[in-house]
Amino acid sequence: MSNGSFLSYMIRLSRDQVMQLVTGTTVYHLYGSDMKKFTFSMPGIEDQGVIVGTLDDMDAEVATLEEKLAKARQLKQGMMQELLTGKTRLVESGKLKMESEK
């Protein structure tokens, strides 16, 4: 017995091994008979559930961090645009001075 999510993670983790079993060049085909050659360690069903839960939590954390990174990049781009247009200027000790503060 196996957890479907666990199998999905194992297949993605073992991409190189799976790609060796694939046929076709533009459209990939993977047959059940080929998947019989796919080998990996199979922990018990309870352990699979724990592993999947941990990996799902990690995926959620990575997604959150990627969102924060995208927002930080947008902020950086906006700040660079203000500096390049002269709307904001750098003054002594690296502080920003807005044009409206003059």
Image (cartoon, rainbow, N blue to C red):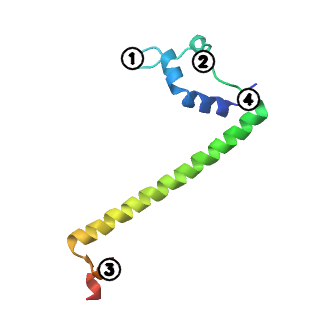
Name the secondary structure under disc 1. loop
Foreground tag (1 vs 4): 4
Answer with mark 2 or mark 4, whichever residue precedes in sequence: 2
Give me the disc on residue 93: 3
User: Residues at badges 3 and 1 in contact (C-beta under 8 Å)?
Assistant: no
As measured in the structure, the alpha-carbon distance from the residue carrying label 3 to the one carrying label 4 is: 58 Å
Q: Earlier in the sequence, mark 1 or mark 4?
A: 1
Residue type (three-letter) at the residue carrying disc 1: Thr
Q: Amino acid at mark 2?
A: Phe
Tell me the residue that label 2 is attached to.
38
The front one of 17 and 99 is 17
From the viewer's perspective, is residue 72 above or below residue 40? below
Which residue is rendered at x = 73% and y = 29% of the image?
Answer: 43
The reply, left or right, for residue 7 in relation to residue 70 is: right
Residue corresponding to mark 1 = 25
**Which residue lies under the disc numbered 4?**
43
The spot of residue 19 in percent (x, y) is 48, 21
